[in-house]
Image (cartoon, rainbow, N blue to C red):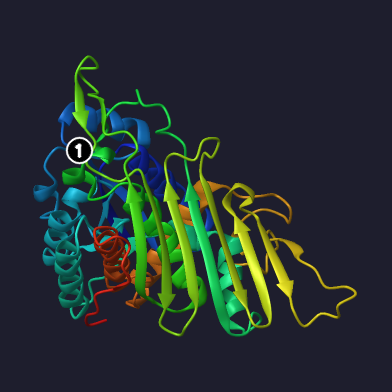
Amino acid sequence: MNTLGVALVGHAFMGAVHSQAWRTVGRVFDLPARPERVVLCGRRKDAAASAAARLGWRECSDDWKSVLMRDDVHIVDICTPGDSHAEIAVGALEAGKHVLCEKPLANSVAEAEAMAEAADRARRNGILAMVGFNYRRVPALALARSLVQQGRLGEIRQVRAHYLQDWLVDPQAPLSWRLRAERAGSGALGDLGAHIVDLAQHLVGDEIVAVSGSVETFVGERPLPDEPARRGRVTVDDAALFTARFREGALGTFEATRYATGNKNGLRIEVNGSRGSLAFDFESMNELAFYDGTDPADVAGYRRILATEPQHPYLEAWYPPGHVLGYEHTFVHELRDFITAVADRSTPSPDFAAGLHVQRVLDAVQRSAAQHSRWTPVLQGER
């Protein structure tokens, strides 16, 4: 079996999640190549060394550029804030490394375009790139996509999705990097909205082409993390709402917020078609609600599907039916798919072109909000 050496850049929350997935994927799935956790990169050598020991990486480094020159590194996994995605990803692709990059792809359309162009050039040489939209890999949602593809919902007419959190409800919560536009690009819109935009487009197999949006920042200043007595300005949105039109005519409604008191990680999506509907709630992530509109009226109703059978996507490698999976398993599935694509030299999904389109949708929402929610077309480009 071939070995794929992995370099992880970033070791905070998402780096820890990815580390767990790299440690697990080869123990669960029969892979065409074996991943090896070679080196973990961070800004400070001492912090990187501590994280590498804790998370199970062989080496550590505070210089990601030097890591790109190593012959024993074949994959670069980017788990840094969005302001560094473009530089690292483009550098890695030009160095001949496969790239997995966390979402959103970048902080701007221009950066995302540069990344997609670099990925297209690299693809011609067999080097692949994928965006880490992990919710696609929830088995219940993979099943939902299959039902749509089979035509079980008929013509798709409406999509409604929201992603609700409440970790910023306290106005004294510190000014983290996620609240600074120069680091994060946008707030709830990019952090949470990117997920539901990708998921909606993925489920229905169609692209958003126009939006009407509003964004709001509820608390304009917050305590600085290292100097609580001083306050700094919040430069991103706290909440975003928008309606959308899909290319084939469906309508969508989207909401992303960090101010929905009582909601911890409330990702929910519903799709309505001419023959049926489906609904999903991440807080019950092993379940899918499905309504078959062709059932006789006297027995019609939403059915609860417990997506834990070995016939369901990804479940052939896990536990007996009814033994539910969790958040971390979506990343294991993500790596299974990425490693398989790298070994097969097949286009991974979602690729950087798909990530670029999500970035264009987010940009259109911001442009619409700046024009009093005017209907705004999503920028189009080569796909």
- The quarter of the picture where the N terminus appears is bottom left
Left or right: where does residue 333 sit relative to residue 359?
right
The correct choice, above or below, for 336 with respect to 180 in the image is below
Residue that numbered label 1 is attached to:
42
Q: Residue at x 17, y 69 (%)?
A: 113
Q: Residue at x 40, y 50 (%)?
A: 22
Q: Residue furthest front?
A: 372
Left or right: where does residue 251 sit relative to residue 65?
right
Q: Quadrant of residue 207?
A: bottom left
Query: Between 27 and 204, which is closer to the camera in this rendering?
Result: 204
The correct choice, above or below, for 56 with respect to 293 in the image is above
Give coordinates of residue 239: x percent, y percent.
Answer: 38, 47
Q: Is residue 31 at least partly visible in the picture?
A: no
Give coordinates of residue 373: x percent, y percent.
Answer: 33, 62
Q: Quadrant of residue 49?
A: top left
Give coordinates of residue 182: x percent, y percent.
Answer: 16, 45
The correct choice, above or below, for 110 with respect to 218 in the image is below
- The quarter of the picture where the C terminus appears is bottom left
Query: Between 339 and 186, which is closer to the camera in this rendering?
Result: 186
